[in-house]
Amino acid sequence: MTVAELATLVDGAVLGAEDASGREVSGGYASDLLSDVMANAQDGDAWVTLQRHVNTIAVAQLKNLSAIVVVNGRQPEAEMLARAVEHQVPVVSTPLAAFDVAGRLYEHGIRGRRTL
């Protein structure tokens, strides 16, 4: 699944780095705690979160995430979108709750890959 397909699936829109929306999503991770994402998200994951500030872009870069999915209809801050474009990190905004986004992704074959 591509980031563009993910955006359609979650009734969302790609708001930053639209030209990177062809990037492949190979897994998913849902968390609102940046340190948790840094410790546990994996390369190619789509990160589902309500965080909408610029620090999320740094985390996405660090972990080589495919996209950041901002939930609950929250709109990313302008600085976040500017940094997303600069560093080619797609940002998807969706009106859905995180639980619903995770469910839709799971239904379409995107799995969390964290092992204990």
Image (spheres, rainbow, N blue to C red):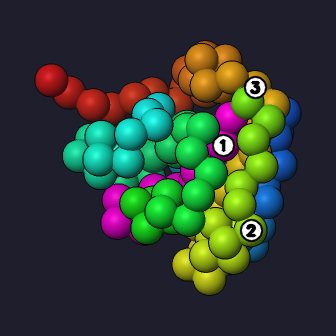
Picture quarter with the N terminus: top right
Whichever of labels 2 and 3 marks the residue nearer the N terminus, that label is 2
Q: Is residue 100 above or below residue 50?
A: above
Magenta stretch: includes residue 60: no
What residue sits right under mark 2 in the picture?
78
Measure the C-alpha gap from mark 2 to mark 3. Answer: 21 Å
Looking at the image, the residue that sits furthest to the left is 116
Give, as a three-letter code, the residue at label 2. Ala
Magenta stretch: includes residue 68: yes
Q: Residues within 10 Å of mark 1 (few under 14, many from 20)?
A: many
Q: Which mark is residue 96?
A: 3
Whichever of labels 1 and 2 marks the residue nearer the N terminus, that label is 1
Q: Report the residue at 78% width, 55% height from top.
A: 14
Whichever of labels 3 and 1 marks the residue nearer the N terminus, that label is 1
- Toward which corner of the image does residue 23 lie, by quadrant? bottom right
Return the x and y of residue 42 as percentages of the image width and height.
Answer: 33, 48
What residue sits right under mark 1 in the picture?
70
Residue 110 visible in this rendered orientation of the protein: yes
Q: Is residue 36 above or below residue 95?
A: below
Part of the protein shown in magenta: 61-71
Give, as a three-letter code, the residue at label 3. Leu
Name the residue nearer the viewer: 108 or 57.
57
Q: Report the residue at 60% width, 17% height from top.
A: 99
